[in-house]
Amino acid sequence: MEKWKTLGLEYIFKTPFGNLRKDKCQLPNGLIINEYYVNEYSDWVNAIVITKENKVVLVEQYRYAGGDFFLEIPAGIVEENESYEEGILRELREETGYISKTKPIKMGEFMVNPATQTNKVITFLIVDAFKEFEQDLDDTEEIEVHLYDFEDMGRALKQSQIKTQLFTAYAYYMAKEFLVAKSLQSN
């Protein structure tokens, strides 16, 4: 297999939230696509956050494109000159007031939708979290913090009892697998 060749690109629009680009591409078989649209977004970070009491820290907020309220793990865009780890710790503190003295554990980096988007999400596990601050929300944010028992969350996800998005569900299952393996190693 070979990569596609970019023959040209044009920005349709640029915004603080992301850019829309129209590329002209040539496939390895010679076919030319004159209008291939690419969404340029910033990378973002998220974390499954577990308290000392084995509760998952979730944020509930209205998601306009989804047209409803969703329970999600804390997440956000990494700011300039900030590491992924610093970004998730800042987002956790701002959105929830929770912190941890335990270093975040990186679960992985994943392209969000490599067919049409340029960004990736970097997922962490944060354990032994505790509430230390009040929320420090942006003007566009209205967030309620919820604590959900770790095991109950797994059942709720399987039975579609909570409204969430893919990244929250996947982070939960990665964390569960990690914690089970860690438990088996210590026994």
Image (tube, rainbow, N blue to C red):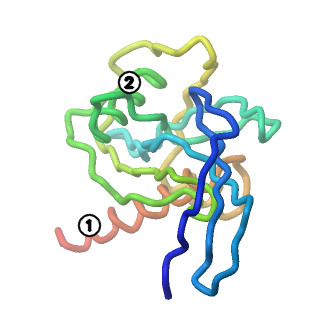
Q: Nearer the viewer, residue 111 or 52?
A: 111
Mark 1 crowd level (few <14, some 14–19, many ≥20, 10 Å Cα): few
Residue projecting furthest to the right? 67
Residue 151 visible here: yes
Q: CA distance from mark 1 to mark 2?
A: 28 Å
Question: Residue 136: percent from the left, percent from the top?
Answer: 46, 13
- Taking 98 as reference, is 41 above or below it? below
> Which element carries disc 2, helix, strand or loop?
helix
Mark 2 crowd level (few <14, some 14–19, many ≥20, 10 Å Cα): many
**Residue located 17% across and 68% down the image:** 186
Residue tagged by mark 2?
A: 93
Q: Is residue 86 left or right of residue 4?
A: left
Residue 55 visible here: no
Question: Residue 118: percent from the left, percent from the top?
Answer: 52, 53
Q: Quadrant of the C terminus?
A: bottom left
Residue tagged by mark 1?
A: 183
Q: Nearer the viewer, residue 41 or 157?
A: 41
Q: Are marks 1 and 2 in contact (CB under 8 Å)?
A: no
Q: Amino acid at mark 1?
A: Ser
**Residue located 43% across and 21% down the image:** 94
**Residue located 72% across and 30% down the image:** 62
- Taking 41 as reference, is 177 above or below it? below
Q: Nearer the viewer, residue 34 or 52?
A: 34
**N-terminal label among 1 and 2:** 2
Residue 146, image quadrant: top right
